[in-house]
Image (cartoon, rainbow, N blue to C red):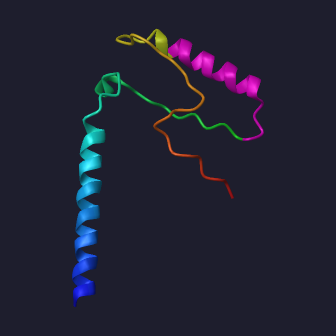
Amino acid sequence: MSAEFAMAVILLTGAGLLIRSFLAVLAIAPGFRPEHVLMVNIDFPDSTPQSTQIASCRKALERVAVLPGVQSARAVSNLSFRTTREPRD
């Protein structure tokens, strides 16, 4: 009985700390207004040469940059908010 109570206290404490940490992360400003950001993932086949990938991304950025209301268009090769890529079968 006392072991069950101890485990319950440990689990509740862990859950409380997890919630507290999650709320602290939500309070951190990302440095941009996320409601005005559009993120698109372009996944090229592994056989596509890197030069072709770069050229395609540049062409897409040029087309997006001239759309009405677009203030800035950028590309990154590794987005820090993204999880690691899962291996393909």
Vertical relation: 89 (above or below) 39? below
> In the image, residue 26 lies at what x, y percent?
27, 39
Can you say which quadrant of the picture contains the C terminus?
bottom right
Looking at the picture, does residue 3 appear above or below residue 24?
below
Q: How many marks?
A: 0
The question of residue 56 being in magenta is answered with: yes
Task: Between residue 42 and residue 81, name the one nearer to us.
Answer: 81
Split into 4 quadrants, where in the image is the N terminus?
Answer: bottom left
Q: Residue shown at 54%/17% (left/top)? A: 61
**Position of residue 26 in the picture relative to residue 41 (left or right):** left
Q: Where is residue 17 in the image (x, y as percent from the top left)?
A: 27, 55
| Quadrant of residue 9 within the rendered picture | bottom left
Q: Find residue 83 and report its horizontal and vertical position in percent.
A: 51, 45
Residue under the image location 52 percent in, 32 percent down: 79
Q: Residue at x 24, y 50 (%)?
A: 20
Q: Observer-nearest residue: 12 or 89?
A: 12
Furthest residue in direction bottom, as rendered = 1
Q: Is the magenta stretch mostly helix, strand or loop?
A: helix
Q: Is residue 35 left or right of residue 50?
A: left
The span shown in magenta is: 46-63
- Tell me: residue 1, above or below residue 36: below
Residue 29 sits in quarter: top left
Give the side of residue 53 with respect to residue 13, left or right. right
Q: Residue at x 24, y 44 (%)?
A: 23
Please check the rendered image and state whether residue 32 is part of the magenta-colored stretch, yes or no.
Answer: no
Position of residue 65 measured from the top left corner of the image (x, y, whole percent):
47, 11
